[in-house]
Image (cartoon, grey):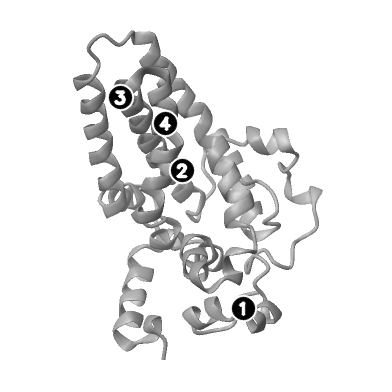
Amino acid sequence: MTKENTPAALERIRDAALRYDLGRMDMKRLTTVYFTYPAVIVYLVLSAAAIWGAVATSAGVQPWRLLAAFAVAQLLYPIVWYGLHRWILHGRWLYRMKWSATLWKRIHYDHHQQPNRMDVLFGSLTNTLPTISLATVPVGYLIGGWSAAFTALATGLLMTCVYEFCHCIQHLNYIPKNKWLARIKMLHMAHHFHNENGNYGIITYWPDALLGTLYGAKERPRSPTVFNLGYDGEEAERYPWVAELSGDTPRR
C-alpha cells in the first residue's frame, strides 16, 4: 500500500474531492471557496507585504521605474507561464527520473487526470512561490532596485490570483455569459479534453498565437494522450514511479 493509498489518506482525498469539486460549484460558491483557500490567502498576504516593501523602499526612486516594473512583470508573466507549461509541465522528462516523478505528478499530471479538482489545480506553494519570485524580483531589481523588485513581485503574486481564479472558472460546469471568459474557457477545455499540445495559456494566449500553438477544436485531431500526457501503460512499465504513487494505471 502506497503512502497515498492508506485509509486515512483516501478519506482526506474523498473529503477534498467533495469540497473542491469545481464541476459542482457555481460562481457564488467558487468565490467563497477561492478567497478562503489557503494558497490564495498566502498570495494576498504576501502581495500586501510586497506592496508595503515597495513603498518603504521607494525613497529617491523615480515613479516611472515602478511603473516599468509593474508593466514588465505583466509582460513576462504569460511568457514564463507558457514556457513552463509547454516545455516543463508537458515535457516527458520529469516522470522519467525517480527524484522528479513526484513533482511532475503533483504539479500537472494529477490536474489532467482530475481537471475539476480545485485543490489539485493549485500548485503547491513550495513550487509556485520560488517560481513567481524568480520571474519577477530580478528584473524588477534591475529596473529600479528593491522598490521596483517588490513592485514586480506584488504584480506577479496578484496576477497569479487572477490567473487561478479564471482557471477555476474555466473548470466550472457552465458557459460564462462574458464573451472573453467564454472564449478562454473554450480554449482551455480544448487543451484538457481535445489536444494537450496547444492552448498553453490561461487568460493570455498571445504566446500561443505567436508560436503557433493556438488552435480551435476543429483544427486538430483528438490526442490519445490528452489525459495521461504521454504517461501510458507502456511508459508506466518503464518508469513506474508516478503509477506507484497513483496506485492505479494512467487514465486514457
> Pointers 1 and 3 in contact (CB under 8 A)?
no
**Residue designated by label 4:** 138
In front of the other: 98 or 29:
98
Name the disc covering residue 250, or none.
none
Task: Please identify, in this view, whether the residue under mark 1 or under mark 3 is nearer the observer.
Answer: 3
Q: Which mark is residue 239?
A: 1
Distance CA(mark 1)–CA(mark 3): 44 Å
Q: Disc 2 vs disc 4: Cβ atoms closer than 8 Å?
A: no
- The answer to whether residue 86 is above or below residue 72 is below
Within 10 Å of the Cα at label 4, are there few (<14), some (14-19), or many (20+) other Cα atoms? some
Question: Which residue bears the numbered disc 3?
Answer: 146
Residue positioned most to the bottom: 1
Q: Amino acid at mark 4?
A: Pro
Q: Secondary structure at mark 3?
A: helix
Left or right: 78, with 217 as reference point: left
What kind of element bears circle 4?
A: helix
Q: CA distance from mark 2 to mark 3?
A: 30 Å
Disc nearer the start of the sequence (1/3): 3
What residue sits right under mark 2 in the picture? 166
Q: Left or right: where does residue 184 sit relative to residue 118?
A: right
